[in-house]
């Protein structure tokens, strides 16, 4: 559970660009920073090599190219797929890895820096994703099958998985407390500093201006939003959070959702699902027992139980479901 934060200068920070975002590692011991940064770099390279949809030589790209047939995969990709399918089940299919074709139809078929200037095509007709249940896994043989014409996109889980893995590895190897943040997906392992690891929470994902600051002692915290990864698709403004039921960007209701959970993967899946749910998200998050902060498109903010609301903010009534 997050607490209101009082940041200190006793933590040690390494920052770099990776996976199209900012990657950070914070350690509780100064002498561990160099080794921690090296371990983080290894994890970033691993997840990019295994799960990137934009690298022709990635293992995921080879799997997608072999759609319609069974494909043997590495243990790393098998783990990433198992995690993605588990999060799909946990969110009732809202966070679905089979939205790869939908992403391509929206023009998000390359690094976002190339998509940002705009894509010269029109908004496609609605087309549901094949669905996570269409993916078959045989862990004993490390064999995966996806339907003909389908494409896997691990963007909703792979980065968070990398954060969890990196934090756990750094703690186990070096013995220090550590926070790993990959573009707002944060994971903590080991003993946290007094007061916890401070994390800025912004109303628009990745902005440098944090609206609030909280601290976490363990687990993960993640934010999902539509404020940054937007682009013009012909005459339409679109974003990257896709509703698997339509294959189109989810209807904007929340600008940003931040949530905490036992792992970064779980927090990210919850925040992404909440973005797609719209008004139902508060009740769903409450039912899951997940502390969260949700910013509507008009800038108003809602909280679920356990999130430390600012003293100046009045309690927000639970929203009705629909």
Image (cartoon, rainbow, N blue to C red):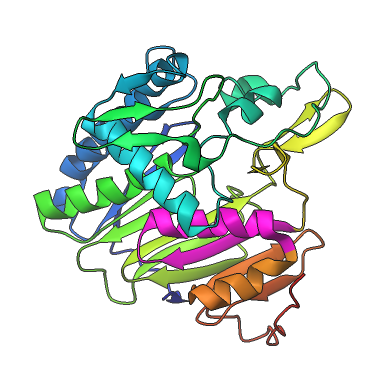
Name the quadrant of the N terminus.
bottom left
- Residue 105 location in percent, x, y? 69, 23
Q: Is residue 313 above or below residue 96?
A: below
118 is within the stretch colored magenta: no
Residue 15 in view (yes/no): no
The residues colored magenta run 254-278
Name the quadrant of the C terminus.
bottom right
- Residue 304 location in percent, x, y? 59, 77
Which residue appears farthest toward the right when viewing the image? 235
Q: Nearer the viewer, residue 208 or 138?
A: 138
What residue appears at the point 42 percent right and 15 percent down from the top-left corner? 66
Instruction: Say left or right for 169 vs 207.
Output: left
- Residue 44 location in percent, x, y? 32, 33
Q: Nearer the viewer, residue 235 or 205?
A: 235
- Residue 256 location in percent, x, y? 65, 57
Instruction: Say left or right for 175 vs 110.
Output: left
Q: Is residue 112 above or below residue 246?
A: above
């Amino acid at each position: 559970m997050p607490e209101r934060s009082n940041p200190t200068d006793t933590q040690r920070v390494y920052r770099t660009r990776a996976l199209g975002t900012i990657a950070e590692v914070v350690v509780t011991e100064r002498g561990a920073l160099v080794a921690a940064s090296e371990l983080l770099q290894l994890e970033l390279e691993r997840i990019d090599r295994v799960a990137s949809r934009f690298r022709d030589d990635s293992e995921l790209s080879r799997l997608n190219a072999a759609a319609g047939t069974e494909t043997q995969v590495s243990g790393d990709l098998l783990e990433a797929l198992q995690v993605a399918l588990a999060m799909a089940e946990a969110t009732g299919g809202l966070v679905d890895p089979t939205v790869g074709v939908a992403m391509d139809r929206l023009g998000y078929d390359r690094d976002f820096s190339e998509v940002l200037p705009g894509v010269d095509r029109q908004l496609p007709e609605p087309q549901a994703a094949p669905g996570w249940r269409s993916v078959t896994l045989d862990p004993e043989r490390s064999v995966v099958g996806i339907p003909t014409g389908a494409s896997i996109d691990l963007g909703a889980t792979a980065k968070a998985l990398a954060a969890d893995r990196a934090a756990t590895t750094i703690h186990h190897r070096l013995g220090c407390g550590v926070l790993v943040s990959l573009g707002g997906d944060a994971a903590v392992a080991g003993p946290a500093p007094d007061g916890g690891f401070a994390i800025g929470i912004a109303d628009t994902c990745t902005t440098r201006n944090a609206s609030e600051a909280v601290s976490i002692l363990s687990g993960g915290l993640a934010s999902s939003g539509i404020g940054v990864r937007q682009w013009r698709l012909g005459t339409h403004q679109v974003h990257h959070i896709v509703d698997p039921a339509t294959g189109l960007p989810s209807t904007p209701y929340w600008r940003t959702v931040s949530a905490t959970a036992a792992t970064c993967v779980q927090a990210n899946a919850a925040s992404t699902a909440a973005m797609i749910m719209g008004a139902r998200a508060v009740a769903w998050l409450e039912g899951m027992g997940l502390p969260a902060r949700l910013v509507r498109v008009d800038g108003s903010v809602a909280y679920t139980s356990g999130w430390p609301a600012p003293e100046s903010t009045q309690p927000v009534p639970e929203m009705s479901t629909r």
